[in-house]
Image (cartoon, grey):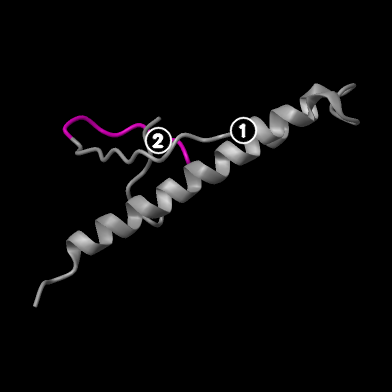
Amino acid sequence: MIQPTTPSSKTVFSRPALNTPIHVVFGPPIDVSSLLEMRHQPPFDSRPELLYELIAHRLEEEVRRLQAELHRRLASRREPRA
């Protein structure tokens, strides 16, 4: 997934123009095992889509955290050094 590199970007997904630098930020592996353990408990046992929504929400939170980290890193590069 390619993330926009400006804090004012309104979309999570974007396609960079040709010859545009891109930045890659990796985070730690995301452990969803605690969520998966709930798959046999109500209401997830009868409605697995609810569990999928929880997992998707967890992943979205991590993407947003990484996006914020990228913005911090880019801002620190732009600040003049004394």
Q: Quadrant of residue 73?
A: bottom left
Q: Where residue 48 sits: x, y (%)?
A: 80, 23
Query: Mark 1 sits on what residue?
Result: 32
Frontmost of labels 1 and 2 is 1
Task: Decide: few, some or many residues near mark 2? Use Cα within 10 Å; few <14, some 14-19, many ≥20.
Answer: few
- Mark 2 — residue? 14
Q: Which of 22 and 55 is in front in this view?
A: 55
Taking the image as drawn, is residue 10 in sight? no
Residue type pointed to by label 2: Ser
Q: Is residue 11 left or right of residue 81?
A: right
**In whole angstroms, how far apart are the C-alphas of marks 1 and 2?**
26 Å
Q: Residue at x 38, y 56 (%)?
A: 7
Please name the amino acid that badge 1 sits on.
Answer: Val
Q: Main secondary structure of the magenta part?
A: loop
At a point 35% along the width and 38% down the height, the residue shown is 26
Pick out the residue farthest to the left.
82
Q: Say if 14 sits above or below 76 in the image.
A: above
Closer to the N terminus: mark 1 or mark 2? 2
Q: Which mark is residue 4?
A: none
Picture residue at 51% right of the left edge, 43% below the top: 62
Compared across the picture, whether 6 is left or right of 34 comes to left
Q: What stretch is highlighted in magenta?
A: 10-19
Q: Is label 1 in a helix, a strand or a loop?
A: loop
Camera-side residue of 11 and 39:
39
Residue 25 in the image, given as x and y percentages of width and height: 32, 41
